[in-house]
Image (cartoon, helix red, strand yellow):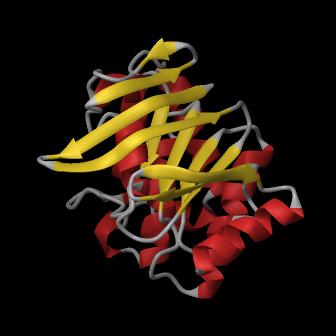
Amino acid sequence: MLELKGVHAHYGLSHVLQGIDLRVGKGEVIGLFGRNGVGKTTVIKTIAGWVKPSTGQVLFDGERLDGLDSDRICRRGVGLVPEDRRIFPGLTVEENLWLGQMQCPSRARAESRRRMDEIYQRFPRLAERRRQMGTTLSGGEQQMLAIARVLAGSPRLLLIDEPTEGLAPIIVEELFELISELSREGTPIVLVEQNVHRAIRLTTRHYLIERGQVILQGDSRVANERENLLSRISV
């Protein structure tokens, strides 16, 4: 469904991605792991069009995404939940969610309302706080709102960057269960997460990134391949 071929990316003179190759099949959850600053976030920002690749190809359902603006990539069904959540200040929870539906401009009003009802059924805490300003929510609730806002647009591919950072353990478990539920429903996901021991259980396959390159990939469902990843990260 998604494929990166020889992707390089720069921030100014800094060569961040140095020939990334990876693929995501339908219904897969792909884990991108590695230490801070190795390029994981840049990979998903490049997929989403927030960073333009210097060379290489990003293919989604066989069509080139590299070079397209981020809004066009979003409308093709690629949804990004960024690390900093980007909850819009001055807007309520519900207004933030309505903005998420803007990636489906042709959606009828009745269908949009049905989608909003589905979101509230999945996130009852957000339903309770629908009139509350989004930036006044707790950190865990803001993360749920960031995910719900992307889901409101019915993405065909979900990119999630560090969803559990700085959150209480009980909220972390709720978020991991949500990601697992989305996976069971068939949503392909690319997940960047520092809690490797917990996140590896959610993933179908994994990639270990170091200095902007994939140095290891494996099947997360195979015990020795999981252990190989964990041992490499702990070195």
Q: Pinpoint residue 54: horizontal percent, then vertical percent.
A: 25, 31
Q: In the image, what residue occupies the spot 41% across and 46% down?
A: 43
Q: Is residue 102 visible?
A: yes
Q: Is residue 206 visible?
A: no
Q: How many marks?
A: 0
Q: Pinpoint residue 18: horizontal percent, then vertical percent.
A: 37, 43
Say which of 29 and 126 sits in front: 29
Vertically, is 76 above or below 167?
above
Q: Pinpoint residue 41: horizontal percent, then vertical percent.
A: 39, 55
Say which of 22 and 151 sits in front: 22
Say which of 93 and 212 sits in front: 212
Q: Is residue 220 left or right of residue 173?
A: right
Q: In the image, what residue occupies the spot 67% across and 57% down?
A: 179
Q: In the image, what residue occupies the spot 50% across and 81% down?
A: 167
Q: Pinpoint residue 44: horizontal percent, then vertical percent.
A: 43, 45
Q: Quadrant of residue 227?
A: bottom right
- Looking at the rendered image, the quarter that the C terminus falls into is bottom right
Q: Is residue 202 left or right of residue 62?
A: right
- Looking at the rendered image, the quarter that the N terminus falls into is top right
Q: In the image, what residue occupies the spot 56% across and 25% down?
A: 111
Vertically, is 79 above or below 1?
below
